[in-house]
Every structure is written in structure tokens, then in C-alpha cells.
Image: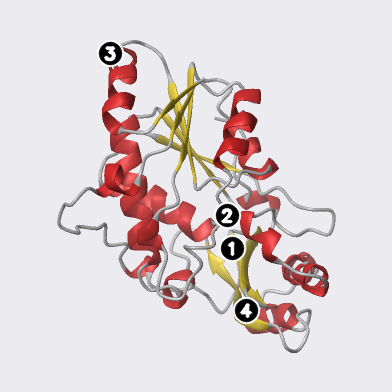
Amino acid sequence: MKVFATQAELAAELDPLWSSAARISLVPTMGALHEGHLSLVRLCGPCDVRIVSIFVNPTQFGLNEDFARYPRTFEQDVELLEHERVDFVYAPSVEDMYGRRAKITVDPGDMGRIWEGAVRPDHFAGVLTVVLKFLQRVKPDVAIFGEKDFQQLTLIRAMCAAFDLPAQVVAGKTLREADGLAMSSRNRFLKGSEREQAGQLYQALEYGRELFAGGERSLDVLREGMRSKIAPGIQIDYLTAVETERLAEAERVTDHARLIGAIRIGSVRLIDNLAVTDITEEPATA
């Protein structure tokens, strides 16, 4: 496995591959890797060349967010990826990614200003900009993203379609702890009883799915039912059902809806989602 720190090093290695029939896969990450990330790497199996990027992207963090304390475990990450037989790791510096260029970003549009975008106003501009740069630099045939960040996944797919980017975007299913908590690098910040409370988000989404399976289609009823599973004192940023393509609410919830939620426990913000039925589940292989 080779590790590259600059775009020039990466391009020198990939240049002969781009003109060959080799299929290239990319898993973009911010490091602090866990089993959820590794499950995405394993979806690269059908490709000839497997690349993982590690970059804590400053442009997707807002004021008073956790950029400085975001976990950085580079040496451990590299060991894990070597065990997974990844071919290349691209771990650029902020200077390598952005240099001193004027700040030009991708506008996520209206769909990027709701839900996560309403709570974190510049977040998706930062996410889409760095993803676009990685797609342009690596030129993968397949790019793999986790389904846990469902709004992000939807926006990345929309960006690829809008800009005619050739990479196939593949979604990896959310891996969970025993109590249903979605695996996340930020889970390590949960302390004591906070970890027990964290499972309530998944339980709320599961309850919404149970209500839907029982025939409930009212958005208000589903929303209130899910909120009832969150203990008083836990801040709910949102907990609702949206249609998968536009991420918009509808008074009547359909089979193609997605239950989404975000809560705050102590200093940790958790997000998660579930499809209301198996109809909307994403394919698990590249």
C-alpha cells in the first residue's frame, strides 16, 4: 500500500491507470476509521484499484463546531487500511487541497439549506466542494459513501448528475452498535450515561417504521410518535419523514420516504436515518 500526501504524487501513480482498462474505486473519509468505514472499503472489491482518502476538511465545519477536536488517528487508520488490502491512501494537507486560491465553492441549492443545512449553514458547500475536488483528482469509476449521512449522499448524487461527473456513486449500509446506534467517529465523545441515551435516536426511528408498517401514513402522527421516544432534556434538531429525492416533507408519507433525525446529547450531535420500508433500501454492492 502506498500513501500519498500531494496531488502531484497521486497523479503520477494514477496517470497510467487512467488510460488503462483498470476500474478505480474511491472511499472518501475524514479518518478516525471504524468498522463502518471498513465496510465501505470492502464494497470496493469488484474494482482493480482501491483508494481511500483521509482528510479532515475544514470548510465543512462551522464556527463553534468540533474541527479542532475531531479525532485524528492516522497511523492506526493506515494499519487498518493495509489489512484491508487498500492500494493507495491519499492524505493531503489543507494547503495541498486548497492552496491560496480564491474561495470558490459548490452551491448545494435549496436541498442543501434544509435539515442539516439549516443547522449547519455552510456545511454542504464545504462537503460538495471537497468531494468534487477528490472526484476530479482521483477520477474514480466508483465512489462509495455511507448511507448514514443520507442528505449528504443525496446531494452528492445530485451534484454528480448536475455536473455530468462519470463516477458511479454507491451507498454503503449503516453499520450499528448492539443497541442500534449508528457507528460514527464522534461516538467516542459520548461519556457515561450519554452513551446509553444515544440509542434513543435509532429507537425513535424504528418506532416510526413500526407505525408505518402498522398502516400509519400521517406525517404529524409519525413525527410525534418518534419524538415521544426521545427523553426530555435531549435536544431534537429534527425528527421527521421526507421523500428521498427532494428531502421534502409531505403530509402523507409514502413507501419511498426516509425517516431522518438529529439530536444533541451533551457535546455530541448525532444523526441517523431509516427507510420506512425495504423498498427504499440502497444496493449494498458496487
Residue tagged 1:
257
Q: Taking the image as drawn, is residue 40 in sight?
A: no
* SS state under label 2: loop
Label 3 with label 2: CB-CB less than 8 Å:
no
The residue at 79%/79% (across/down) is 229
Q: Earlier in the sequence, mark 3 or mark 1?
A: 3
Quarter of the image for residue 212 reads bottom right
Whole-number angstrom distance, CA of label 4 to CA of label 1 = 11 Å
Of the numbered discs 4 and 3, the one sitting upstream in the chain is 3
Quadrant location, the C terminus: top right
Tell which circle, 2 or 4, labels the residue nearer the N-terminal end. 2
Q: Are marks 2 and 4 in contact (CB under 8 Å)?
A: no
- Between the C-alphas of marks 2 and 4, the distance is 37 Å
Q: Is 1 placed above or below 58 here?
A: above
- The amino acid type of the residue labelled 4 equals Leu
Q: Residue at x 71, y 47 (%)?
A: 175
| Number of marks in the rendered image | 4
- Which residue matches tag 2? 71
Is 244 on the left-hand or right-hand side of 132? right
Could you tell whether 40 is left or right of 197 in the image? left
Eye-nearest disc, 2 or 1 = 2
Amino acid carrying mark 1 in the image: Ala
Q: Pointer 3: what residue?
A: 19
Q: Which is more N-terminal, label 1 or label 4?
A: 4
Q: Spatial distance from mark 3 to mark 2, Cα to Cα?
A: 37 Å
Identify the element where label 1 is drawn.
strand
First-in-chain label (2 vs 1): 2
Q: Secondary structure at mark 4?
A: helix
**Circle 4 sits on which residue?**
219
How far apart marks 2 and 1 lie (CA) works out to 33 Å
Q: Position of residue 222 (x, y in %)?
A: 69, 78
**Circle 1 crowding by C-alpha within 10 Å: few under 14, some 14–19, many from 20:** many
